[in-house]
Amino acid sequence: MRDRVCLVTGATNGIGYETALGLARRGARVAIVGRDAEKAQACAARIRAAVPGAAVDAHVADLSAQAEIRRLAGALRDAYPRLDVLVNNAGAIFDRRTLTIDGIERTWALDHLGYVLLTLELLDTLKASAAAGGKPRIVNVASAAHYRGHIDFDDIEGARRYGAMRAYAQAKLGNVLFTYALARRLKDSGITVNALHPGVINTGFARNTGGLFGTAWSLMRPFLSSPDKGAETSLHVASAPELDGVTGRYFSHRRPKPSSAESRDEAVQERVWALSLRQIGRSG
């Protein structure tokens, strides 16, 4: 990965941090994104301390807000003439239904639309890298929760019926659907797009939830895998030489695995693609 530029969102803790650290150890220049400037700078400093000589840049954005994503993408385009790996990792689960500044339910906005908008905003930079002889990769960190997900086109934002896990599973299904739809559009472009399940990992994932789910998660945490284990599949999909040219796949435990039946329905993929573009104000 030496001399390659890699971007990791949600990189100030957990799987995102370990992914950024692993890419730095492989020689990449790493750009990390977090919501809190102090935490982002501290994490960049930790990576530099762990990997002497590592090139690590910290960027700040709330990836649930579309204006913030567009601002971030502009700064990234200015800072990096090339982008070799984009790891869409930022996400959370929320026990109460709240709306973002854009008026969109927060889980769908952050966990799904954030991936879509940032990827499309950076697509020209990825294409430029491919044209220059690179092999850019888009890595979407989804979840096995997508197997429980269903895209409710009549209530996509849970206005009539909201549940934390229901909203999260739907958004993670959205990640896989987006992966397949984008991979189809980028066929023969030199850019690969894959999704993955990192495992059930001991992170701050459910810090925004209370009730039965939050209590159950806190009881489970001591028995879950560590974040560095969770980053193994992300790092594999982002950097393994044998995956050059492999696109439109879903990985778990570093191996390709069939995703849910709904995720493989091309008609659903296209409906979610069209819906997502409308929600982020894009066409085509």
Image (cartoon, helix red, strand yellow):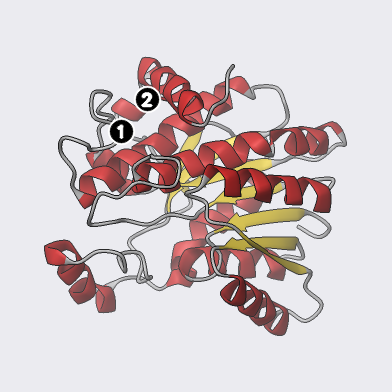
**Residue 165, position in %: x, y?**
22, 50
Q: Is residue 230 left or right of residue 70?
A: left
Classify residue 226 by image quadrant: bottom left
Tell me if I can see residue 62 in this picture: yes
Dot 1 corresponds to which residue? 260
Q: Residue at x 75, y 51 (%)?
A: 75
Q: Residue at x 64, y 48 (%)?
A: 86
Tell which of 50 and 253 is nearer to you.
50
Q: Would you place residue 207 above or below residue 64 in this image?
A: below
**What number is the disc on residue 118?**
none
- Callout count: 2
Which residue is farthest bottom? 49
Compared across the picture, whether 109 is left or right of 57 comes to: left
**Can you name the residue that lies furthest to the left here?**
212
- The amino acid pointed to by label 2 is Arg
Tell me the distance, in whole angstroms, between the alpha carbons under discs 1 and 2: 7 Å
Q: List x then y, in percent, for residue 157.
A: 29, 36
Q: Is disc 1 surrounded by few (<14), some (14 to 19) or many (20+) residues within 10 Å? A: some
Residue at 22% across, 36% down: 159
Provide residue 243's location: percent of width, then percent of height.
62, 42
* Element type at mark 2: helix
Q: Are marks 1 and 2 in contact (CB under 8 Å)?
A: yes
Nearer the observer, 213 or 219: 213
Q: In which quadrant is the N terminus drawn?
A: bottom right
Q: Residue furthest right?
A: 132
Q: Is residue 83 visible?
A: no
- Residue 75 or residue 10, whichever sits in front: 75
| Mark 2 surroundings: few (<14), some (14-19) or many (≥20) residues within 10 A | some
